[in-house]
Amino acid sequence: MKYLLFCTCLLLSPALTRAHDDAPIPGTGEQHTVEERLQALEAHQTELYHTLEEKKAAGLDSAITDRLTVSGLIEVEAAASDVASDDGSSDAASDLTLATVQLGLGISLNEIMSGDVSLLFEEGAFGADDTDLEIDEAALNFAHGPWSGRVGRQYLPFGVFHSHFISDPLTLALGETRETAVLAGYAYGPAALKAFAFNGDAEKTGEEDHIRDWGASLVLTPAEGVEVGGSYLSDLADSDAELLEEYTRRVGGWSAFAHLERGRLTLDGEVLGASKRFAASDLDSDGDGRGDRPLAWNLEVAWTPVEDVELALRYEGSDEFAGQPERQYGADVSWSPWEHTTLSLEYLHGEFDRDFSADDDGNVLDRQDLVTAQLAFEF
């Protein structure tokens, strides 16, 4: 309990523009991302939900010249955790981190072509390795009528990961995929389709290293405030979850999502998982000889009772996804006291399946309680 009080007193807080969330800032109803400004010619539904680069981009796109814009995001977090193992022992910790520093540059080349570069630094909490300053994304964008394209380092449109919380949903932990890829899109009426190809890091045993990985996404907007869609990735081992580096049998991944917005209320649901079981010789965390079939899902509801305040609830879970909670739920409150500034406070309680809960030290986890407070500022 003293750790919960520590976080509550140190900061309040959700994120004004979370790296994984393209939802509007509470009370503003506006989207502010590099990709949206750069691809103004693309259809609205395509801009909002079809690529993860739009969700990762942050900031307000301040113009430096007619062709160049700059934007950024700074997030400072205080976190406390209490993790219990099935042998009755527990481990509590707290930390203060510079969670995110992101700087984006947008370049308008002409009416059809544009480019963007995003630099990212993330400091891990509780002794996790820091992420050195890196090029998060760098790509050239094409937009002409209903057609669009993107070539370069980017987050692929496998999953959408909408969230109102500070912490990433389990669906993102399993499915987020960043690669150097070529992507093409087409929007027609309420439908938008994207397809992509790349050379993933994971390879089948004995195969040569070639561009053989691919995927596609489809999003439908049948009515105002309603969106549904799905996506497919030919090799789930290529996601940033890094399930495998080498395998004997390739396993694809699939996802489906729904988004509903009515007045002050927003509902989001998503499920993402493997299309079939991995070979037991490749991935078998519980040792049952059948091979694992990882799956993750997330449900969230958000409500804006007054301007600049948002309340959110989450219920999520996973199946055969080693190291992640089998069930997790919690609440988040966000407040934007000043323009471009957000304070957030979140609590999550997770429970583990002992067959898939061993940590890096071999401890079998039973449950965890996490409190995170965040101060976020975009520019």
Image: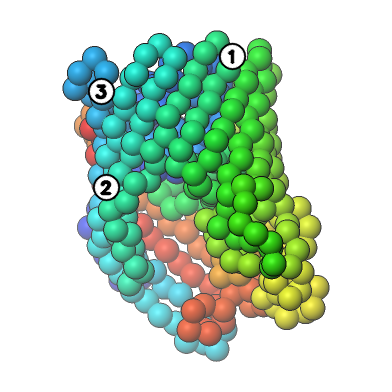
Percent across and percent down for residue 269 are 62, 41
Task: Find disc 3 in the rendering and name its residue.
Answer: 68
Nearer the observer, 261 or 200: 200
Q: CA distance from mark 3 to mark 2?
A: 20 Å
Marks 1 and 3, the one that precedes in the sequence: 3
In this rendering, the answer to whether 25 lies above or below 359 is above
Image quadrant in which the C terminus is located: top left
For marks 3 and 2, give the one nearer the viewer: 3
Q: Residue furthest front?
A: 208
What label does residue 146 carry, if any?
Answer: 1
Dot 2: element? strand
Nearer the observer, 39 or 352: 39
Marks 3 and 2, the one that precedes in the sequence: 3
Percent across and percent down for residue 356 are 63, 74
Q: CA distance from mark 2 to mark 1?
A: 34 Å
Task: Find disc 2 in the rendering and name its residue.
Answer: 101
Q: Pointers 3 and 2 in contact (CB under 8 A)? A: no
The crowding category of the residue bearing disc 2, from other C-alpha atoms within 10 Å (few below 14, some 14 to 19, many at least 20), is many
In this rendering, the answer to whether 282 lies above or below 76 is below
